[in-house]
Image: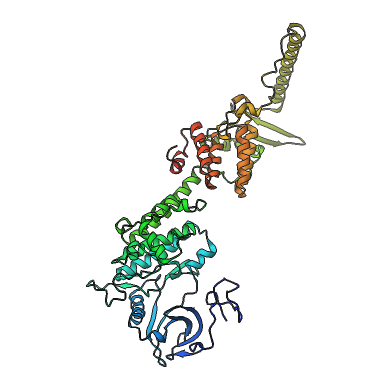
Amino acid sequence: MLCPSCGADTGDSAKTCQRCGAAITRVSDADGYIGRVINRKYRVEALIGEGGMGKVYRATQIDLDKKVVLKVLRQSLLSDQRTVARFQREAKAASRLNHPNSISVLEFGSVDDDGALFIAMEFVNGKDLHQILSKEWPLPEGRIVRIMSQVLSALADAHSAGVIHRDLKPENIMVEQRRGEPDFVKVLDFGIAKIMDSTGDEGPALTRAGFVCGTPEYMSPEQARGAQLDARSDLYAVGVILYQLTTGLLPFDSDSAVGFATKHLTEEPEPPTMKRPEAKISPGMERLILRAMAKDPNDRPQTAEQFRAELIAVDKERRAMAAARRSAGVLAPVPRKATPIEQQETKIDQKPHWGADETVRAPPGLLGRNRANAPSADRTRFGTGHTELTHLNTETGDVSEPGQGGMLIFKIVTIALVVISLGLAGFYVYQYLGASDDEPYRPPPNAPMQINQNEIDGDRPLHELEVPPQKRNAAEAERLERQGDEAVERGQLDLAATRYKEAFEKDPRPELSLKLGELYYQRSQTAEAKAWWARHLRDHPASKARAYVQQAFPDL
């Protein structure tokens, strides 16, 4: 038997597909539709689903050689007027819709041979959202927005046509991977849809007064009460689905349908970030989910179009925050291969002392002047049998001959030797003639000093470390920071944090506390992130990253 989900051969006895994990429903020998041609149009090939009302088959439309789905009502239910009306209502509701994200109904009729009612619908070669949630969670927030914005677009079309779904849930949302259109959505199963005509009459009642229909886990409070429904009931179900997609869990837990309905009526949902702290959920998404699940329909988004616009705005806000994080220089830039100093057209100081927001840039005038003078800076004159070099004085623009340059160097070396000799002689005289025997030895100011770490930080956390300027080692800190940047590029965030901390111990610059705060924030360690960012803003009050930091921690 072929898997109804992915089409793989599952053999004769497997209960689940080995490729995609879908449940396999075996067809009994008594099923009389497999292999039959219904009404000379549809060749029935496989059973892909079964429920209380009937069975769902995969079939081929013979004239077009096109895959379709046939939903056949059980013959034992043909005498139940309410069930027949509900089946007809599904066909009528779906036929009213003309939207790319809604399932298309091809035909509604009865089987010629036995009079069973059937609906022919388009075949969707994909997975339902429940399968995706079960196997692929956590889902990126961008993907969640892409899927649910299509669902809301289909609901907007249905609501404008006077159709309320009333049973929206992940199992009724199919997701298909099309070429150039990832996660293309189809909303299914309008079996208990409510149809409102232009006069306000919803046709023959399919439910008794006070009767509750739908799936308890996704019911709105008014639906759980059996009250009059409008389009906002579907939007509550969208909120529950969003909650489940972001956290991987339902907002309420219960062992019974009554328990679920009671909690939808009486309990407020726990915020998604508290339900699943490790999940990456943006603040805007959490606010929208909780608003959509408000008990009072007036507190929810009022239309599917409005809900969709707010959902897309949340995604834009999330992307803007990510872009601001990158532009603020929070994460290290991609290391580049440096050009050797001797090959640089404009030579710069290798040990600059920049602020946290300064940028390396050679003045345009200096670049132009260097380029203009480059041909005369090092010239080679070819003569008869010898090579002569001339040199450009970069301060005055004068050209000096080799002999003059050599004499100048000789003078400088001679003076330096004299100064060193005098210094050594003075030191000798001081040590052996002028110094007191009981005076303790004092090392010269430039002598290397051993730093006692306990004298620096004691038991305080590292982000409170204070290193006196004379004990800092900027060169070593820069080397460790570069290693941290390289670790970030390789995705080794633990190693990067270690290197940044070691660099901070050598030279606690604001750039390092900024990077450490970002690393901890990306790993959802908010307390550490806040402490490091607080240190950054303390050391650099004019930081350009202040706005970004305060989006995450407004009290800083």
383 horizontally vs 238: left or right: right
Q: Relative to residue 461, is residue 306 depicted above or below? A: below
368 horizontally vs 413: left or right: left
- Nearest the viewer among 103 and 79 is 79
Name the outermost residue toward the bottom.
113
Q: Residue at x 52, y 77 (%)?
A: 4
Name the outermost residue toward the left.
199
Residue 157, horizontal then vertical, whole percent: 34, 68
Residue 88, horizontal then vertical, whole percent: 34, 80
- Nearest the viewer among 31 and 212 is 212
Q: Is residue 486 visible?
A: no
Q: Relative to residue 63, is residue 20 depicted above or below? A: above
Residue 37, horizontal then vertical, whole percent: 47, 90
Q: Quadrant of the C terminus?
A: top left
- Nearest the viewer among 474 and 429 is 474
Q: Residue at x 71, y 23 (%)?
A: 409
Q: Quadrant of the N terminus?
A: bottom right
